Amino acid sequence: MKIRKIILLCLMVIVSSIQISIASESSAERANSIQTRINSVAFDILNRNKIEKRIVFVYDEDGKKNLLTSDKTLTKREVIVYDDMYKAVENDDELAAMLAREISFAIRSFDGVCNGFLRSLQVKAAPKKYEIVADKRAVDYMVNAGYDPVALIIYIQKTAPQLRFDMISAHNLTSKRLAVIYEYIYTKYPYFLKNNQYINNKYYQNFLLTSSANRKMLEYKVKSNSKEKLDYE
């Protein structure tokens, strides 16, 4: 009887080890597949925009973005894609949207004196300004690389929460960012709105619903041929 129990125990240990090994291998294969996809889209953006700066991309399955630590995008020119960022991506357009913004920040770290060190400090000192700059540049990068910039609106709509106010925040209101992006696409790349492949997308529909007041401001600006900068809410 004791021998039988020992044999059963050994079998259970073996089976458990096999299951752990299979699970580990499956996790590694998933991570490798995601990393390959990220690299494919990211280097597509870099090459088609003729960006002559070196940037690497790392998929982090377990980590989460820590706002208290230094941003490696600015310090090491390394874009880290955390799993909680990636899981919201539904297609390559949305992945390009996420990566294009990160690339825009990374590029800033190469500009100016001290090999970009001072520029990195400027980005950290005026995050709201450069947040808008990064959004607009992301649109340009996406279009140049053959991706639909409307996906940037969709990705932000479903991932960026709406603050109560932004007076003492390091970030703009998400609604304001989305309105600026929409106006930028409307003005510079109207084709994507006139031939909007995402018009029936539920997240884009939600954007239309929640951005009505801001879009009315843009509509009035267009009709009146105004050149003033709109103060979106």
Image (cartoon, rainbow, N blue to C red):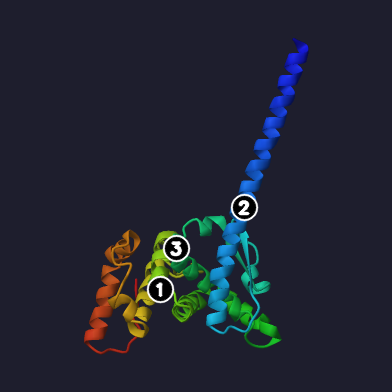
Residue under label 1: 148
**1 or 3: tag closer to the N-terminus:** 3
Mark 3, other Cα within 10 Å: few <14 / some 14–19 / many ≥20: few
Label 2: which secondary element:
helix
Q: Where is residue 32 in the image (x, y as percent from the top left)?
A: 62, 57
Label 3: which secondary element:
loop
Mark 2, other Cα within 10 Å: few <14 / some 14–19 / many ≥20: few
Residue 165 in which image quadrant: bottom left
Which amino acid, mark 2?
Glu
Residue under label 2: 29
Proximity of marks 1 and 2: CB atoms separated by less than 8 Å: no
**1 or 2: tag closer to the N-terminus:** 2
Which amino acid, mark 3?
Asn
Which amino acid, mark 1?
Asp
Above or below, comparing residue 17 to residue 147 in the picture: above
Residue 40 in which image quadrant: bottom right
**3 or 2: tag closer to the N-terminus:** 2
Above or below, comparing residue 54 to residue 80 in the picture: below
Label 1: which secondary element:
loop
Residue under label 3: 91
